[in-house]
Image (cartoon, grey):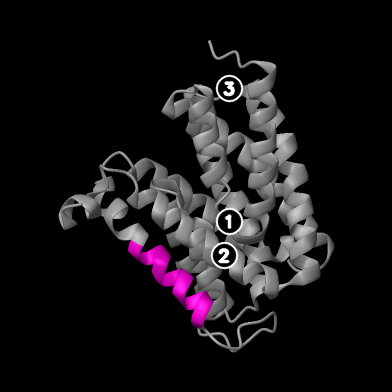
Amino acid sequence: MFDPSLQVTLVLGAAAFAAGFVDSIAGGGGLITVPALLLAGLPPVETLGTNKLQGLFGSGSATLAYAAKGHVDVRKQLPSAAMALCGSAIGALAATVVPGEILQAALPVVLIAIALYFAIKPNMGDVDRAERLSPFLFGLTVVPAIGFYDGLFGPGTGSFYMLAFVTLAGYGVLKATAHTKLLNFATNIGAFAVFAFAGVIYWKIGLLMGICQFLGARVGAHMAIRIGSRLIKPLLVLVCVALAIRLLADPANPLRVALGF
């Protein structure tokens, strides 16, 4: 039975607050909370389940903050959120048959490409641009496809939604961030339901971390709203690169094996 000391509990709370702050702006909060839970002594499956529980609080908090300031109309986006949730649920089912090695090898390359895009692309601010896909087609195809990926594998989902909103939906960076958080919340619900049904969640620590994540996300979202793309862009680039490095640091990563590292 997992019974963390007071010191470990405080460290997990601090990690959740930091994760909520970062995730509400650029995604990638799992970079902080998953290693923290593993180091605290949780088994891998319980780590993923507990992480989804506390992550719900962060994505939900950020969504509320952005909605309160008018950056996302939750009611209007409910169909897209439903499509994201369905995609995530189907992805979770497919996770048992699709080889994860393919995604593990490709993801670091894709994340670095996203980082370069946001770092180099000129005139990328908070002003909306011309859309390349209609809202209906975007919600019918891109949204569930990325949701499927989140259920199947997960890392970098926020970055993929950000890139899709900016390049295909024509959203400004701040608006894209707000809508990404709503869809992240929807995909998290699907994964959380699966883990809860399987009974692999440590509820006490998950709820405690959830409260801290809620507060961190609140602070991060308000900073993003106040500063906009000047904060979101560099943090997004940093998160993408950090996640790529973390994936490549795994000796079992198929890309490292293929390159002989």
Circles 2 and 1, Cβ within 8 Å, touching? The answer is yes
| Magenta part, dominant SS | helix
Nearest to the eye among marks 2 and 1: give it. 2
Residue at the spot of label 1: 27
Q: Inspect the image, locate mark 1, and give the three-letter code of the amino acid beneath it.
A: Gly
How many residues crowd mark 3 within 10 Å: few (<14), some (14–19), many (20+)?
A: some
Q: At which x and y percent is residue 3?
A: 60, 13
Q: At which x and y percent is residue 236?
A: 57, 65
How many residues crowd mark 1 within 10 Å: few (<14), some (14–19), many (20+)?
A: many
Q: In 3D space, how far apart are the residues under numbered discs 2 and 1 (Cα atoms)?
A: 7 Å
The kind of secondary structure element at disc 2 is: helix
Circles 3 and 1, Cβ within 8 Å, touching? The answer is no
Residue at the spot of label 2: 236
Image quadrant where residue 243 sits: bottom left
Q: Inspect the image, locate mark 3, and give the three-letter code of the amino acid beneath it.
A: Tyr
The kind of secondary structure element at disc 1 is: loop
Residue 110 falls inside the magenta stretch: yes
Nearest to the eye among marks 2 and 3: give it. 2
The kind of secondary structure element at disc 3 is: loop
Mark number for residue 202?
A: 3
In this view, the residue in front, 211 or 73, is 211
- Extreme residue in the top direction: 1
Q: Left or right? Give the position of 240 relative to 63.
A: left
Image quadrant where residue 36 sits: top right
Q: In 3D space, how far apart are the residues under numbered discs 2 and 3 (Cα atoms)?
A: 30 Å
Task: Kindly tell me whether residue 50 is visible in this rendering.
Answer: yes
Residue 81 falls inside the magenta stretch: no
Residue at 70% of width from left, 48% of height from top? Answer: 60
- The magenta-colored residue range is 109-120
- Using the image, determine if residue 257 lies above or below residue 52: below
